[in-house]
Image (tube, helix red, strand yellow):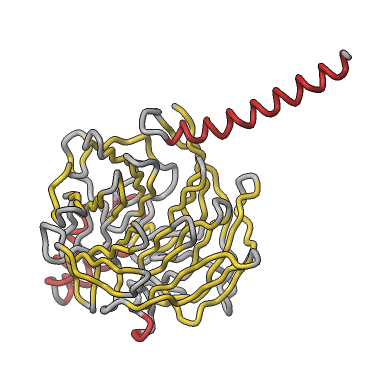
Amino acid sequence: MKKICLILSIIFIISCSGTNTANNNTNILDSKTDKKIVWEVGGHLPAQTGMDKNIGTAGVLYGSLADKYIVVGGGANFPEESVLNGGAKRTYSDIYMLEDKNGVLEAVEHINLENEIGYGASVTTDDGIYYIGGASNPEADDDILFITLKDNKLNVEKIGDLPFTLQNGAAVYKDSKLYIITGKQAGKGSNKLYEYDLAAKEAKELAPVPGEESRTQAVAQLLNGNIYVFSGGDLTAYTDGYKYDFASNTWTPVAEVALNGEGISLLGAASVKLNESEMLVIGGFNKAIYDDAVYNLANLQGAELADFRSGYFGADPYEFNWNSNILIYNCDSNTWKTIGEIPFDAPCGEGLILIGNKIYSINGEIKPGVRTDKMYVGTIIAK
């Protein structure tokens, strides 16, 4: 009898422990829980088809499947020569499915798409990952791809076309519709918002995002049933933010991206939705340095331009002062806060994926023209 009681006690303890772990993961992501992230290096992506080594890419496709697998791929880099020396940018068709094995990201599958891709919009849903635009082939730059698991293998289907090509835009999913937000539409920077009905396969233009007429590389999430869009830029980097109301088809301003009264650019950053009220953001070009570089690269000439290019593209990553704060926006309080800094070079154009209380930052640009080949695994814990 004592043995039976002991066995039942052990089973009860294990059962309760498992339940508490699941609840703890949920509670950690709750907006009421103070958080921090513990980071470790998760490895490197395998070489692209035909390449000896993967030196990292930016502008990647990214998302998750079955709350288990990390999907990342495509993107662009400069494999032969640096930007300073006139190197050509190359995009890739390689897509990887990864699994977290005790903090090490192992490639489960590696496939190649029909087209090379980069700088499209990625949206993860319960059913799969949508990838919108972002192809080096102009004829495929308006494609909507849907990535799912079929017999535990990656399955990629083209499920629609936009009425325009898309690069450096953002997107969210709501009620069987995709919402495509700003970016370079039909080859030109835009402030337009479109609704794409996945059933009818039709696009409808909605009210444009306020502010500048051209907004690329912004971050956006669906929070409490509204679209929130922040930052982005064009000739200058922006720090503004807006909320879209579906019922009235209107936008209203929300809190500027700022800490302690100082505006922060999220141009080129990536974000994930933590809960219905909060989004987390990593990365973003420094506004002052970006604005200055865009102006000088467009206006200087001769020796002055050559000297500026040499100093700018030859600088170390830390000199660009990209945003290293792990930022959280709360739509209930309409506030920004930081939960610490990342312990690695701040990336832009990275893949950022959330599965449970694990967050994955994969590749990205760490200074103009230079990528990181690293993948980082973060564990979100209570502070």
Between 51 and 59, the residue placed more toward the observer is: 59
On screen, residue 20 above or below 155: above
Figure quadrant of the N terminus: top right
Q: Place residue 82 in its image quadrant.
A: bottom left
Task: Residue at 22% x, 72% y: name it.
Answer: 306
Please indicate whether residue 180 sits to the left or right of residue 128 in the image: left
Residue 97 image position (x, y, % from top left): 58, 62
Q: Is residue 188 above or below residue 55?
A: below
Q: Residue furthest bottom?
A: 139
Answer yes or no: is residue 80 visible.
Answer: no
Left/right of residue 7 with respect to residue 64 in the rendered view:
right
Q: Vertically, is 114 above or below 125? A: below
Residue 294 left/right relative to 144: left
Q: Is residue 97 left or right of residue 305?
A: right
Q: Residue at the location (29% across, 55% down)?
A: 219
Number of numbered discs on residues: 0
Residue 141 location, x and y as percent? 35, 79
In this rendering, does residue 99 appear at all?
Answer: yes
User: Image quadrant of residue 218?
Assistant: bottom left
Kindly identify the residue that appears in the image at 10 percent across and 57 percent down. 211
248, 37: nearer the viewer = 248
Of residues 70 and 204, which is closer to you in this image? Answer: 204
Q: Where is residue 364, by image quadrant?
A: bottom left
Q: Quadrant of the C terminus?
A: top left
Instruction: List x then y, in percent, for residue 103.
Output: 60, 46
Spot the residue most to the front: 200
Q: Residue at x 14, y 75 (%)?
A: 301
> Horizontal and vertical percent for residue 137?
38, 84
